[in-house]
Image (spheres, helix red, strand yellow):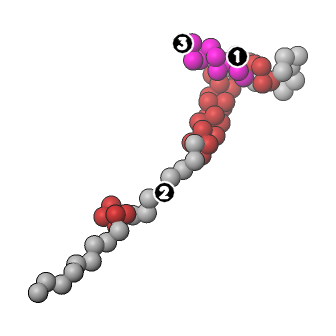
Amino acid sequence: MSAPTHTPPPSAHRGGVDIRLPWWALALPVLAFVTLLVLILDPAEAHAATADPAITRLLEHVQQLMAR
């Protein structure tokens, strides 16, 4: 008579815990990196006070980078 065998859960076969990150856990560091990269590439535009809103300028830079 054979004895029943015990099979481990599927995650034990891979040798670790299955962890999933939310989408923003990757999007926020990428956004910060792109923002700093834009400031490094064009330091003349990185002054503190401007007549244009900063968000508008940032979106224009992102749009220009994506158009390339």
Reply above or below: 50 against 10: above
Reply above or below: 65 against 39: above
Query: Mark 1 or 2 closer to N-term?
Result: 2
Q: Position of residue 22 (x, y in %)?
A: 57, 47
Residue 40 shows up from this direction: no
Label 3 sits on what residue type?
Arg
Residue at 66 percent across and 30 percent down: it is: 35
Give the farthest residue toward the bottom. Answer: 1
Look at the image and say whether residue 3 sits in the magenta stretch: no
Q: Position of residue 34 (x, y in %)?
A: 62, 30
Q: Position of residue 38 (x, y in %)?
A: 65, 24
Bounds of the magenta segment = 58-68
Residue 28 shows up from this direction: yes
Query: Mark 2 or 3 closer to N-term?
Result: 2
Label 3 neighbour load within 10 Å: few <14, some 14-19, many 20+:
few
Which residue bears the numbered disc 1?
A: 60
Q: What type of secondary structure mainly makes up the magenta span?
A: helix
> Of residues 56 and 49, which is closer to you in this image?
56
Which residue bears the numbered disc 3?
A: 68
* Foreground: disc 2 or disc 3: 2
Element marked by disc 1:
helix
